[in-house]
């Protein structure tokens, strides 16, 4: 579960970066 949790965290970070790039 920890690996899955880490993957979700990375995905969320990437998502935030993308949304920040495209307001």
Image: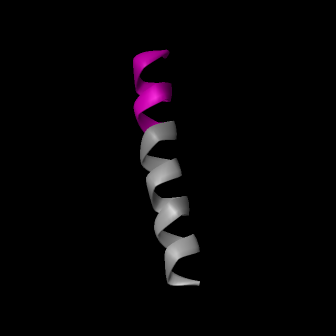
Left or right of 5 on screen, residue 13: left
Residue found 50% across the figure and 27% down from its top: 19
Question: Between 20 and 13, which is closer to the camera in this rendering?
Answer: 13
Q: Quadrant of the N terminus?
A: bottom right
Q: Which residue appears at 41% of the width and 25% of the height?
A: 20
Q: Residue at x 51, y 38 (%)?
A: 15
Q: Residue furthest front?
A: 3
> Would you place residue 2 above or below residue 6 in this image?
below
Please count the marks in the image: 0
Foreground of the two, 19 or 1: 1
Which residue appears farthest toward the top when viewing the image?
A: 22
Q: Quadrant of residue 16?
A: top left
Q: Main secondary structure of the magenta part?
A: helix
**Residue 22 part of the magenta-drawn span:** yes
Please determine whether, in this image, residue 4 is positioned above or below residue 18.
Answer: below
Verify whether residue 10 appears in magenta.
no
**Vertical placement of residue 6 versus 12, above or below:** below
Q: Is residue 19 left or right of residue 20?
A: right
Give the residues in magenta.
16-23
* In the rendered image, the vertical position of residue 12 relative to residue 5, given as above or below: above
Residue 5, horizontal then vertical, whole percent: 53, 73
Residue 17 position, x and y percent, is 40, 32
Position of residue 3 measured from the top left corner of the image (x, y, whole percent): 51, 75
Q: How is the image coloured?
A: one colour
Residue found 47% across the figure and 27% down from its top: 18
């Amino acid at each position: 579960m920890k690996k899955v949790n880490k993957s979700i965290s990375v995905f969320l970070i990437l998502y935030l970066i993308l949304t920040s790039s495209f307001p």
